[in-house]
Amino acid sequence: MMAKCVRCGCEFDVSSARRSIGRSYGAGTYDDYYPNGDVCASCATMEVSADVGTGEEIMELMGDSWDDD
């Protein structure tokens, strides 16, 4: 069954989007971000990759000097 992306309006296969995001960012990532299954793989990739990139940048900036106090 084809769904319609709430962001860009394209029709997409939810299972295919889940597999694509899962291969790139880990199983369950698509459902963590989009529990309703309403975002295509292309739009999901833009959001998830930005979040991952931001997290990597923060870790790089903080290095080993993180103090949990």
Image (cartoon, grey):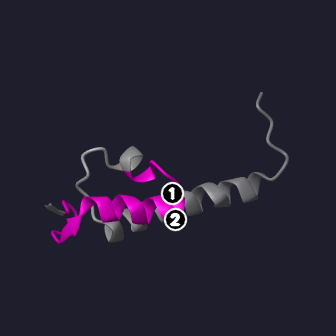
CA distance for labels 2 and 1: 13 Å
Would you say the residues marked 2 and 1 are in contact, meaning their CB atoms lie under 8 Å apart?
A: no
In the drawing, does residue 1 fall left or right of residue 59? left
* Residue 36: image location, x then y, percent: 24, 46
Tell me what residue is drawn at x 41 percent, y 44 percent.
32
Q: Is residue 50 magenta?
A: no
What residue does disc 2 label?
24
Image quadrant holding the N terminus, namely bottom left
* Residue 64: image location, x then y, percent: 85, 48
Tell me what residue is drawn at x 81 percent, y 53 percent.
63
* Residue 39: image location, x then y, percent: 27, 59
In the drawing, does residue 40 fall left or right of residue 44? left
Q: Residues within 10 Å of mark 1 (few under 14, many from 20)?
A: few
Image mark for residue 22: none
Q: Is residue 23 magenta?
A: yes
Label 2 element class: helix
- For the question of whether residue 44 can be seen, the reply is yes
Q: Earlier in the sequence, mark 2 or mark 1?
A: 2
* Residue 10: image location, x then y, percent: 17, 72
Kind of residue at disc 2: Ser
Disc 2 versus disc 1: nearer the observer: 2
Q: Nearer the viewer, residue 56 or 24?
A: 24
What residue does disc 1 label?
51
Kind of residue at disc 1: Asp
Q: Residues within 10 Å of mark 2 (few under 14, many from 20)?
A: few
Image quadrant holding the C terminus, namely top right
- For the question of whether residue 50 can be seen, the reply is no
Q: Which residues are magenta?
A: 5-30
Q: Nearer the viewer, residue 7 or 16?
A: 16
Going by the picture, which residue comes out furthest to the top?
69
Tell me what residue is drawn at x 23 percent, y 65 percent.
13
Tell me what residue is drawn at x 76 percent, y 31 percent.
68
